[in-house]
Image: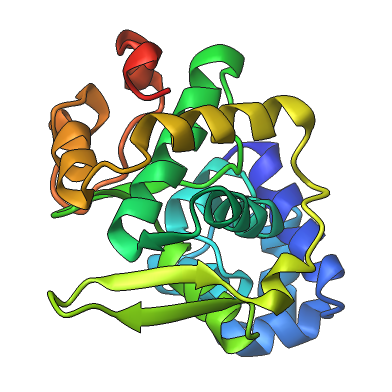
Amino acid sequence: MPNEYFKMIKSLRVEKGLSQAEIAEKIGVSRSSYIAFEQGKRELSLAEASKIADLFGISLEDLKNGTVPDNEKYKQMILAFLRLDGKITKTKLAKLLYFADFGWFYYHLKSMSGMSYRKLAYGPVSDAYFRIIDDLFDNGEIDIVQTKDGAMLISQTRSGAKIALTTLDAEEKKLISAIEKKWKGKKTSEAVDFTHKQFPYLYAQDNEIVSYALFTQENPDEIF
């Protein structure tokens, strides 16, 4: 495992104010076994790794790669799209976020939020998407209404509008704006169908993490 893997887990533990003994208890190992893991002297079993990933709200892939997605930034990306478009279906919003992360990767070789995206029936979706949408709704920062055709329509609340988008710089906001402008007024099905034809989706197995690297073979002008 790369050193970043062990450093990331230690950093997340410290950030949450948890001791090594507390983490060990939560994943069902001895304190000495957990310390050996943080020191890079032992590897976690799949069950132990899954428990740690759930504890810190990250995917197993992020855990293995030693990368930490920026949940706060991802939340602000959601709000940025909602401020530009007013109301967006839950499925289409997931696609716009995919465009933003993969479009940013095309030029900078890193995604905007650091999120991993999985191949699902309605296109690539971040592992954290549904959880963060639930958090925003529970906090009263977004509103979700079911339409007559069963779609979930998301909009920003007054509380959400008060959140400053401080994690997004001017260039990132510019890309989000360009993507929103490109897809404004287009149906959810159009965005879904478009992602189905892209290399990251085509070359991934069902429920598998899609490749950022494959997106460099696409034409970014088609998404923004």
Q: Nearer the viewer, residue 8 or 127?
A: 127
Q: Position of residue 187 (x, y in %)?
A: 21, 47
Residue at the image point whose x is 66% and y is 55% from the top: 76
Residue 65, above or below 59: above
Q: What is the quadrant of the C terminus in the image?
A: top left
Residue at the image point whose x is 22% and y is 35% from the top: 195
Query: Left or right: 177 with respect to 185?
Result: right
Query: Left or right: 24 with respect to 138?
Result: right
Q: What is the quadrant of the N terminus in the image?
A: top right
Q: Quadrant of residue 196?
A: top left
Residue at the image point whose x is 34% and y is 46% from the top: 95
> Can residue 40 be seen?
no
**Callout count:** 0
Residue 149, above or below 197: below
Q: Position of residue 199 (x, y in %)?
A: 21, 23
Residue 217, above or below 124: above
Residue 216, above or below 29: above
Residue at the image point whose x is 61% and y is 17% from the top: 108
Q: Position of residue 145 (x, y in %)?
A: 36, 81
Query: Left or right: 115 with respect to 14?
Result: left
> Can residue 121 be seen?
yes
Q: Nearer the viewer, residue 27 or 182?
A: 182
Q: Quadrant of residue 222?
A: top left
Q: Position of residue 35 (x, y in %)?
A: 76, 67
Colour convention of the picture:
rainbow
